[in-house]
Amino acid sequence: MALKCSVERASEKIGGFATAKKNITIQYQGRERSEENLLQLIKRDALSKGVPDDEIAQVDVYIKPEEQQVFYVINKEVSGQIAF
């Protein structure tokens, strides 16, 4: 029972890793891109392809710095790529 109580208390805890502000930066061969920058570029590219902003429900991102490309799929339907 002690384990269950500890797990329950931990799940009720506010803060910690789940709510901490996070910054993700990808570095490769002297180049650097932040997660926020990449997502902005993906959004701009998707909107230019006619994807309405309010219809974007899921964005899957695949970063391939060795190819200097970032591939993405929106709503499991629209795919594209941007330069890393």
Image (tube, rainbow, N blue to C red):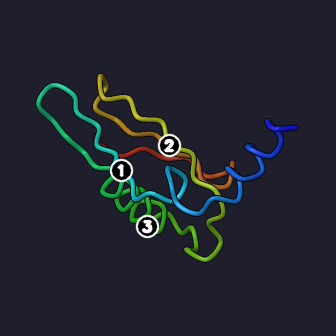
Q: Secondary structure at mark 3?
A: helix
| Comparing labels 3 and 2, the label whose residue is closer to the camera | 2
Q: Residues within 10 Å of mark 2 (few under 14, many from 20)?
A: some
Residue position for label 1? 35
Residue extending farthest to the front is 2
72 left or right of 76 in image: left
Quadrant of the snapshot with the N terminus: top right
Residue position for label 2? 61
Residue 51: image x %, image y %? Answer: 57, 67
Residue extending farthest to the left is 30
84 left or right of 13 in image: left
| Comparing labels 1 and 3, the label whose residue is closer to the camera | 1
Residue position for label 3? 48
Q: From this view, report whether residue 56 is shown above or below residue 18.
A: below
Q: From this view, report whether residue 8 is shown above or below residue 40.
A: above
Residue 16: image x %, image y %? Answer: 50, 53
Rounded to the nearest whole Å, what is the CA distance between mark 3 and mark 2? 18 Å
81 left or right of 11 in image: left
Q: Secondary structure at mark 1?
A: helix
Rounded to the nearest whole Å, what is the CA distance between mark 1 and mark 2? 10 Å
* In-front residue for pair 79/75: 75
* Disc 2 residue type (three-letter): Val
